[in-house]
Amino acid sequence: MMITLTHYLILAAVLFCIGVFGVVVRRNILIIFMSIELMLSAVNLVFLSFSRYLGTQDGHVWVFMVLTVAAAEAAVGLGIIVALFRNKQTIYVDEVKELKG
Amino acid sequence: MMEPIFFYGFGGLAVVTALLMVTRVNPIASAVWLVVCFFAFAALFITLEAHFIGVIQVLLYAGAIMVLFIFVIMLLNIGAEELKARTMQFSGLLGGLVTIYLIVLITLGLLKNPVRFFEPLTEGYGYVAPVGRLLFTKYLVPFELTSVLLLVAIVGSVVMGKRKL
């Protein structure tokens, strides 16, 4: 039984969809944020699988870029969460609805 | 061949811990399961011969980013009475059905393609030296732009940390 490119792509799709599930269903902003990190990692898995299939290392460089974006996103996003908690005393996104039409 | 054992073992671990992560009520438990999930991801990356990226995954994701998450969760200090599974009515069922539909759709689309096997690789694939050489020659401009992005993130988090927004 050989592991092919399709195996890795299906695994990455399943992990990405679990991340989508977390973003859609959960109302806790911290868990929504962690689900986004999970989705970014699933995309990294696709990059590396195609890199392995094509025999080039360009995908590794792009994964490096995605990791940098994830780090920047975590720094700013957690700053926003702390500011939100300081002003509204909540971490649930359904309680923050002043902008709702 | 060890590859199927590693793929199914660590792939299954990643899926199970990811499911545990999105279903836990307590954010601390979620964060710890996500750390385990990132370790499984790192093992999968190393199975794909991406040694450098596997190490970076452990250092940056499981190390730095998740420590930042846990630090913020501890800082917010949410009381036990506020921690309840906050979802809309039927949202779990509906979201689960949509997620399963999405997974089936993508899987069927992928299975239509011909089976693609991995070829044997050249010596030194995925080591630090060749990846670093690419980073500083072919991808020098995106690499430098990354530093601008990090600067923007630093300024943004300083502004967000102000007492009066």
Image (spheres, coloured by chain):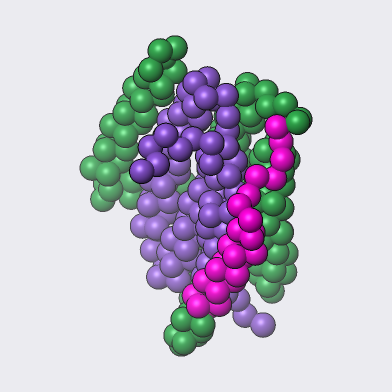
Chain colours: A purple, B green
Left or right of A20 in this view: B80: right
Residue B77 placement (x, y as % from top left):
67, 23
Between residue B158 and residue B8, name the one nearer to us: B158
Q: Tell whether position A91 is magenta.
A: no
Give the answer, above or below, for where B79 lies relative to B39. above
Q: Residue furthest right?
A: B80
**Residue B54 shows up from this direction:** no
**Residue occupying image coordinates x 57% and y 33%:** A91
Between residue A83 and residue A18, name the one nearer to us: A83
Give the answer, above or below, for where A55 lies relative to B143. below
Q: Residue furthest left?
A: B141
Residue B79 placement (x, y as % from top left):
72, 26
**Residue A88 shows up from this direction:** yes
Task: Magenta stretch: give its range.
Answer: B82-107
Residue B109 placement (x, y as % from top left):
46, 81
**Residue occupying image coordinates x 32% and y 34%:** B149
Q: Tell whether position B83 is magenta.
A: yes
Left or right of B30 in this view: B147: left
**Residue occupying image coordinates x 34% and y 22%:** B155
Image quarter hosting the N terminus of chain B: bottom right
**Residue occupying image coordinates x 58% and y 44%:** A27
Left or right of B158 in this view: B85: right
Residue A12 placement (x, y as % from top left):
54, 64
Image quarter hosting the C terminus of chain B: top left
Q: Residue furthest top?
A: B163
